[in-house]
Amino acid sequence: MATASIGDEDESLRAKIRENFTNCSICLKDFEDPTVLPCLHTYCKRCLASYIHDNTPGSIFLCPLCKKETKLPKDGVEGFLHNYFIDSLQDTVLTPTRKKKCGACAVDEEDVEAVSKCLNCSEYLCSPCAKSHIRFKISVNHKVYTLEQLHSGEHQQELQEFQRVFCPEHKEEPIRYFCLKCQIPICRDCKVLTHDEHKCTSLDTAIETVKPKLASMLEKLVDKISGQENDLTTLQGVLRDFGTNTSSVMKDISDHSRHLQQQIQQQEIKLLQEVQQVSEAHKKNITLYMESSEVTTSTMKSTSDLVSSILSRGTTTEILILQQQVGDRLQELLLPSGGGDIPQHLSLQLQTNNDVDREVNKGTGLGKIQQKRQIIQGINSRGPLNVTRKTQFKK
Ligand SMILES: [Zn+2]
Ligand SMILES: [Zn+2]
Ligand SMILES: [Zn+2]
Ligand SMILES: [Zn+2]
Ligand SMILES: [Zn+2]
Ligand SMILES: [Zn+2]
C-alpha cells in the first residue's frame, strides 16, 4: 500500500504524533482497543463504553474532547471504527506502557508479557512462543520481530504490508476491496452479501484517488487555517486600536470637562466682579446724595431756628426791617430742591443661561458619546464551528 512510512519521517513528526496519539483522554493511559469517533477523536473502547450513559442506538452523546454531538451507531460502541492507525503507531512510534500479552499463551488462559510480534499472524508473542512459532512448518516463513526491532522503525514497510485491518461488520474478515458506490472499504463477505451489484476496486487502486482527494481538502483546510490566523491578527489589531480609541475618548471627556470648568470659573469671577462694581457705584451714589441732603437739612434747620427766634423775640420794628430778607430766604428754601439725581432703587439678580442649565440638568452638558460602527475589512465570515457545548447528556 502506498502509505507514507513514519520511520522515514523526522523527529518533529514523531513528536507531534506522540503528542496527539499517546493517551486516551478518558483514562489518560495508552489506548486499549482504540476506537475513533466521527470527529476523529480516539478513546479506548472500554472507556468510551463507560463514558456513554445512554446505550440506546441513535442516542446522542458529546465527544469528551470537542463536545461534538455524536450519534451512537446501531451496534452501540462496537459500531464505531477501530483505529488501526493507532495500533500500528503503538508498534512503532509510541512506547505503550500497557504491556502486550502473548496471544498464544492467552489461548491457555495464561497471562504472559509479549516481547515479539508475528506480522503475518498479527499476533504478539512471548519469547518461548516466538521461538516455537518459527519452528512450525506452517509459520516457518513468518516475519517475527521483537518489539524493539519494530519500534526502531526499520521494519516499518513490512509492518504496513502485513497490517490486517478487519471489517467492522464481519470482525474475522480482513478488508480487501473498496466499494466505489458506497465509498467504503469492504471485506469478502460484504462484497457478496451487501455490495453484490456495486462496482469495487482494489485497495491500491482506490488509494490513488482517495489520497489526492483528501490531500487537496487538507490543503484547503490549511489555507482556511491561515485565513483564520490572519483574521485573528486583524482582530488583535482591531482590539488594540479600540483600546487606544477608548483611552483617547476618555481623555477627551476629562479635557473637555476641565475646559468647561475653567470657563465657568472665569465667568464666575467676571460676574462677581461685575456685581461688585455695580454695587460699589450704586452705594457711592446714594451716600453722596445723603451727604448733600444732610447739608441742606441742617441749613434749613438753622434758618428755621433763626426765623423762629426772630418771630418770637423780635420787636415789631426789628421784624419789619428783616421782613424782606427773611421772606426771600424762606422763599428760597421752600423752592423744590433742584440739582443732583435722586437715587433709584436697584436690585440685582442672577439670570441663569437656560440653554446651558437645560443641557446640564439633562446630563448632557458635557456632550454625549457617539458610536460609529463599520465592517472590519479583511475578516471573512468564517464563524466558529457549530459545536454545542452542553454539560448535560441528553436523556
Ligand atoms: Zn481509555
Ligand atoms: Zn471529538
Ligand atoms: Zn507465549
Ligand atoms: Zn505467524
Ligand atoms: Zn457498496
Ligand atoms: Zn464485511
Image (cartoon, grey):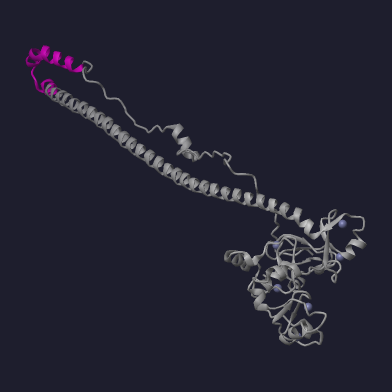
Q: Tell me where residue 388 appears, x and y as whole percent.
A: 71, 57
Q: Nearer the viewer, residue 57 or 254?
A: 57
**Residue farthest along the top direction in this orientation:** 324
Q: Residue at x 45, y 46 (%)?
A: 247
Magenta: main secondary structure equals helix
Instruction: Tell me where the magenta segment starts and ends, as one range.
Output: 307-334
- Image quadrant of residue 295? top left
Question: Left of 200 or right of it: where is 376?
Answer: left
- Image quadrant of residue 19? bottom right
Q: Quadrant of the C terminus?
A: bottom right
Q: Tell me where residue 273 appears, x and y as whole percent.
A: 28, 34
Q: Tell me where residue 372 appears, x and y as whole percent.
A: 54, 38
Q: Is residue 212 visible?
A: yes
Please give the count of numbered marks on the rendered protein.
Answer: 0
Q: Is residue 233 above or below residue 194?
A: above
Q: Nearer the viewer, residue 147 or 316?
A: 147
Q: Is residue 55 visible?
A: no
Q: Nearer the viewer, residue 361 or 235?
A: 235
Q: Residue at x 40, y 41 (%)?
A: 257
Magenta span contains residue 207: no
Question: Left of 35 or right of it: where is 265?
Answer: left
- Image quadrant of residue 125? bottom right
Q: Quadrant of ligand 2?
A: bottom right
Q: Is residue 132 above or below residue 35?
A: below
Q: Quadrant of the N terminus?
A: bottom right
Question: Left of 131 or right of it: where is 319?
Answer: left
Q: Tell me where residue 158 appears, x and y as whole percent.
A: 72, 70
